[in-house]
Amino acid sequence: MSDFKIHDIESAPEDSKSLLQNSIDAFGSIPNLHGVMAEAPTALKSYQVLHEQFLNTSFSAEEKTVVWQAINVEHGCHYCVPAHSAIAKSMKVDDQINEALRNKEPLPSEKLEVLRDTTLAIVRDRGVVSDEVLQRFYDAGYGHQQLLEIIVGVAQKVMSNYINHFADTPVDKQFQSFVK
């Protein structure tokens, strides 16, 4: 049973108040995950920076969704899978891609499949990825930049997935329709 508080601007530690305002400005409200993270201002700030940095990678919206959801599904995150389903929808990512990721089914292109496989190899093998996996990634048209950018996504998702596991973060109302 979790006893983590979901902070709002009034209840948050002083150093989290402006960070929660950033969440309101970006999302129109404070996602429950951010409310939980507000207990530790450095956690919330780190997560927001990682999120912004991952958004600024060279990946397309589809590719970002592949990285995020591959990790969310692998980690079994009850919160992030529906949250990123909503985010994928807002980013105009084809529902078929998101559903394939959620259901561990084949993706519509080999390049996206290679991206998922590489991301999962990084997560499962804690960064010790075989030469064969890397060669397939490079052969698909990705480079060193994208390999390093996956790590930014992994760092972001480890933070949110793990925090959601032990905080048992309730899924926000706006993400409820994406819960399976």
Image (spheres, grey):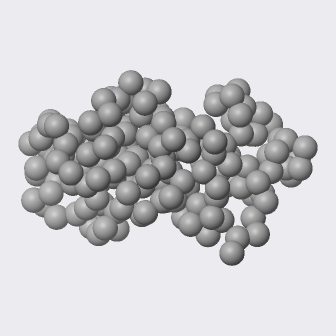
Kindly tell me whether residue 49 is visible in this rendering. no
> Does 12 appear above or below 19?
below
Q: Position of residue 124 (x, y in %)?
A: 31, 67
Q: Identify the residue shown where x is 64% and y is 28%.
A: 26
> Does 41 appear above or below 167?
above
Q: How many marks?
A: 0
Toward which corner of the image does residue 23 lie, by quadrant?
top right
> Could you tell whether 106 is left or right of 87 in the image?
left
Q: Identify the residue shown where x is 25% and y is 55%.
A: 104
Which of the two residues, 124 or 164, is positioned nearer the viewer here?
164
Kindly tell me whether residue 29 is visible in this rendering. yes
Q: Residue furthest bottom?
A: 1
> Could you tell whether 85 is left or right of 25 in the image?
left
> Does 40 appear above or below 165?
above
Quadrant where the N terminus sits is bottom right
> Does 180 appear above or below 97?
below
Which of the two residues, 168 or 144, is positioned nearer the viewer here?
168
Q: Position of residue 28 (x, y in %)?
A: 69, 28
Q: Position of residue 159 (x, y in %)?
A: 55, 58
Q: Identify the residue shown where x is 75% and y is 64%.
A: 4
Q: Identify the residue shown where x is 43% and y is 26%.
A: 91
